[in-house]
Image: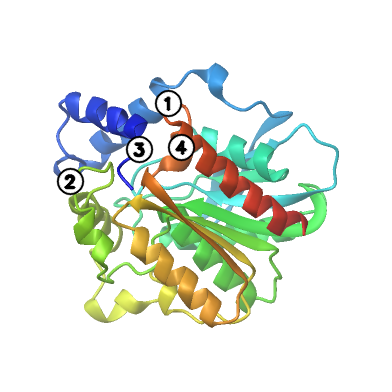
């Protein structure tokens, strides 16, 4: 299927802005640019309405981390979802992924706890992992005051999908039974080689050069032998006994086959998995509903799938 024409227009606008590729920017420049795209250009009125947004602090691996609790306008008890934002472990924050959090809260009918984990290169691997696991562990002890039901899940997009997958493995190992995991175009095999990386190496929002740049910031300090660490590449972890998963990927995404490989490995390990490969879409489509009807339909289908997992 060809690239969604509405997303093609968006990509042309981004290319026409004349900014240097992310791989040629400093982390600070990349963060400002991503914030300009996701926050400064966003119409606040377009955000899904929720009943409340609460600023809070959750435990991290080294002190407290900022977080936001999004409560949908629904009577409880509701499941609780701990959400980790994308951005290659380098960019992104609570503000850049405000739409994602609100969409999950309303579409999945759940209380969402969005976590502002530490970013590289200031805090490289495993800082983000430590924060993600600590925040999920914290939520597991407070589901009664968060969503109110005993059902806890994790969710994330891209790098956040990696952290959600790692947190799911860690919680299983600690004896915490999660209700589900939502992995949107996740990074699961940091150093794997897949056809989609060359097929979609450039021109589709996330490019291969940016992926290499992200890796250098996050894990460039690691020795070769450490690169199969399941906390870095959850595909190399033990997958048996993990919670039901929803894994969604995009056709024109260098991470497409990475996500599909993890979904297949989960299924082989006996984990219930719902997989969707959305034709014509690109990396980050969940946050692009304002620009594309196809992206909006894919986001709606994604939340419907995960809602069934959470409330099943």
Residue 311 image position (x, y, % from top left): 77, 55
Q: CA distance from mark 2 to mark 3?
A: 25 Å
Q: Residue tagged by mark 1?
A: 39
Going from N to C along the chain, the mark reached first, 4 or 1, is 1
Q: Callout 4: 10 Å neighbours few (<14), some, many (20+)?
A: many
Pointers 4 and 3 in contact (C-beta within 8 Å): yes
In the drawing, does residue 180 fall left or right of residue 234?
Answer: right
- The chosen color scheme is rainbow
Disc ID at residue 294: 4
Q: CA distance from mark 2 to mark 4?
A: 29 Å
Q: Callout 1: 10 Å neighbours few (<14), some, many (20+)?
A: some
Q: Residue tagged by mark 3?
A: 4
The foreground one among 201 and 152 is 201
Q: Callout 3: 10 Å neighbours few (<14), some, many (20+)?
A: some
Q: Nearer the viewer, mark 2 or mark 3?
A: 3
Pointers 2 and 3 in contact (C-beta within 8 Å): no
> At 24% from the left edge and 60% from the top edge, which residue is drawn?
197
């Amino acid at each position: 299927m060809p690239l969604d024409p509405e997303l093609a227009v968006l990509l042309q606008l981004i290319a026409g802005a004349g900014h240097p590729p992310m791989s040629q920017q400093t982390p600070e420049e990349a963060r400002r640019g991503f914030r300009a795209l996701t926050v400064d250009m966003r119409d606040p009125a377009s955000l899904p309405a929720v009943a409340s947004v609460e600023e809070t602090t959750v435990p991290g691996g080294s002190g407290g981390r900022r977080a936001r609790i999004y409560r949908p306008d629904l009577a409880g008890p509701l499941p609780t979802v701990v959400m980790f934002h994308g951005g290659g472990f380098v960019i992104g924050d609570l503000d850049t992924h405000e739409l994602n959090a609100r969409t999950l809260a309303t579409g999945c009918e759940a209380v969402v706890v969005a976590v502002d984990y530490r970013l590289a290169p200031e805090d490289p691997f495993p800082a983000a992992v430590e924060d993600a696991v600590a925040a999920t562990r914290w939520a597991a002890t407070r589901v009664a005051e968060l969503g109110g039901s005993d059902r806890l899940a994790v969710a994330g997009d891209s790098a956040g999908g990696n952290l959600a997958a790692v947190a799911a493995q860690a919680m299983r190992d600690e004896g915490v039974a999660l209700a589900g995991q939502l992995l949107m175009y996740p990074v699961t095999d940091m150093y794997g080689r897949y056809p989609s990386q060359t097929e979609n190496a450039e021109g589709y929002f996330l490019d291969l050069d940016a992926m290499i740049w992200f890796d250098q910031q996050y894990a460039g300090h690691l020795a070769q032998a450490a690169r199969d660490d399941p906390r870095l590449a959850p595909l190399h972890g033990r997958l048996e006994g993990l919670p039901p998963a929803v894994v969604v990927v995009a056709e024109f995404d260098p991470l497409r086959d990475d996500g599909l490989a993890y979904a297949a490995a989960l299924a082989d390990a006996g984990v219930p998995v719902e997989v969707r490969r959305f034709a014509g879409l690109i990396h980050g489509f969940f946050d692009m509903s304002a620009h594309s009807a196809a992206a909006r339909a894919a986001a709606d289908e994604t939340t419907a799938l995960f809602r069934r997992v959470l409330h099943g």
